[in-house]
Amino acid sequence: MTNAEIARFFKELGDLLEIKGDNPFRIRAYRNAARTIETSGYDFTKLVKEGYDLSQLPDIGERIAKKIAEIVTTGKLSKLEEVKKEFPPHILDLLKIEGIGPKRARALYEQLGIGSLEDLKKAAEAHKIRELPGFDVKTEEKILKGVVLYKKEGRRFLYAEAEPYAMELYDYLKKHEAIHQLTIAGSFRRRKETVGDLDILATSDDPLGTMDHFVGFDKVKEVVSKGDTRSTIILENNLQVDFRCVTDLSYGAALHYFTGSKPHNIAIRKMAVEKGWKVNEYGVFDETMQRIAGKTEEEIYRLFGMDYIEPELREDRGEIEAALEGKLPRLVEGDAIRGDLHCYSTHSIGTASCEEMVEAVLRQGDAYIGFADRADHLLSSHGKSGDPLEAYLKELGELDRRYKKIRILKGIEIAIDADGSLPVAEDLLTSFDLVYVTVEDHFDLDKKRQTRRILAALAHPAVTALTHPTGRIISRRNGYSVDMERVIAAAAEHRVALEIDGHPDRLDLNDVYARMARDAGAKLLLSSLAQNPEELRFRTYALHQARRGWLEASDILNTLPYGRLTKALAKGER
DNA sequence: GCCGTTTTCGGCCCGACTGTTTTCAGTCG
């Protein structure tokens, strides 16, 4: 069972108990545990089977440890089954609607028998909701709109989808003369792979005028709320934007608060409570309510005796402890990346020629580029005349000679056979600088066989890297079932790099596995998976993912200059 | 239900906006 599946039991339990009106602190405990399970990086199924004492982990005590063991061994949680019996099966869907929390969900169920979004929609349309105490015509209308919106767009946005809207809104806000400082905060600033909404923070001489300006943006579909210091809008693409205005004196505190993540903020606030202080979005205050920090984030971290924590690390996954001990990683910066190590061309699935790609990376100042076109295209003529592999190698060789300012690495991306063998003749592989292997089919193999299959490919002496290692596509397809701990260990052992690609809906490896790879001593490589010059910018998204995975420049192959890179790629000589 | 160099009880992060509650509950971030 995956960690996400185990965590789900506790999230559902928490939500149901909240509707029931149970002890809020117990509910929080379940949610904290769910978070630990999802983000710690351990394989909980394995931990249970090995008899590890789970109560050693944060937010997991004896009772939750027992529950996790029950889930892993029986596939069920009896406590959840019991609570579920008290409610209709789809009641939790109600909580996804804006404006409906646990209290209202309970009222809707108990008084109108509403147990699903369908029921909710019908009741709203029949004007039954407005008659309930605590509801009125306005909330009824809002609920109806919420249901329609949720059905159409009940999802998070890919970072790259939200980005153009974020930038346009940023430029628009910047034009208002009362605004001094302006930052897009939230999960966007933390460079998460998906964002639920945008959180924008400003300082301004004229908060009211600034709020008016904000809701006057031309892509606004709806103004959800508008106050003196805070407003919320929904854009025409259904992306929600929260805007907050503070004074310069509070900017650092507000930025910290508005950047999150929530668990990170809570951890900092708990530290404050221990010292007798209070942290809110206006600053850090001591016992006498004197402001002792707040202008900048640096000031706040310093006050707590910590190093500055980059936004990408703020997930409460150990960054606070590391910052206290001065052991934070020096995160890789964009200018440390010297070239792209995975591009395509018209020799396989790309839409631009090798030369067009080379010209484009020259313009962005790269020192080298690695092509890794797909083996299935290179090894069969696909109706083209001549030998496509020979043509490919010849063209790359010529370009490498002709372009003096850039080096070109010849690569191939091979789909691993179901049994783990590589469908390419052994002697052909010596022609390549980059031999990438990947899983392209047989996604439904069981975990054991899938793992064995990948391990076999990694053990092949010619292999340089495993590309898009988990096979997931964000919010559309889970990766195949595989023991990533073993894959990562094998990659480290055989000196095979793991790719972090920057394709907006792949971003594979994710942050948690990237960090696990670093801890295991495996090397990583960043790539755009660009099929044309326009997509070369995707490498930035791979960089985001690397930073979220705690990676330093030394963890990443394509921070090396060309000479050292080729040495590193020659196996056994690293 | 978790957690603890001011421990095994008594805490558990903090504030804005909405609605109609003229003092606060519900929801949200």
Image: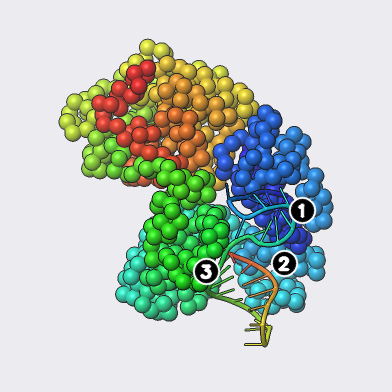
Rendering coords of residue A164 (x, y %)? 39, 57
Quadrant containing the C terminus of chain A is top left
Crowd around label 1: few <14 · some 14–19 · many ≥20 (10 Å): few
Q: Name the residue located 55 percent from the left edge and 46 percent from the top edge.
A: A475
Q: Amino acid at mark 2?
A: Lys
Q: Secondary structure at mark 2?
A: helix
Which one is nearer the viewer's eye here, A250 or A369?
A: A250
Mark 2 vs 1: CB contact within 8 A: no
The numbered dot on residue A287 is 3
Mark 3 vs 2: CB contact within 8 A: no
Q: Amino acid at mark 1?
A: Pro
Which one is nearer the viewer's eye here, A300 or A335?
A: A300
Q: Chain of mark 3?
A: A
User: For this view, does A477 lie left or right of residue A538?
Assistant: right
Using the image, determine if residue A25 lies above or below residue A428.
below
User: For this view, does B13 lie left or right of residue A104?
Assistant: left
Crowd around label 3: few <14 · some 14–19 · many ≥20 (10 Å): few
Crowd around label 2: few <14 · some 14–19 · many ≥20 (10 Å): some
The numbered dot on residue A103 is 2
Q: Chain of mark 1?
A: A
Label 3 – label 2 distance at C-alpha: 35 Å
Looking at the image, tell me whether mark 1 or mark 3 is earlier in sequence order: 1
The numbered dot on residue A89 is 1
Q: Secondary structure at mark 3?
A: loop
Q: Secondary structure at mark 1?
A: loop
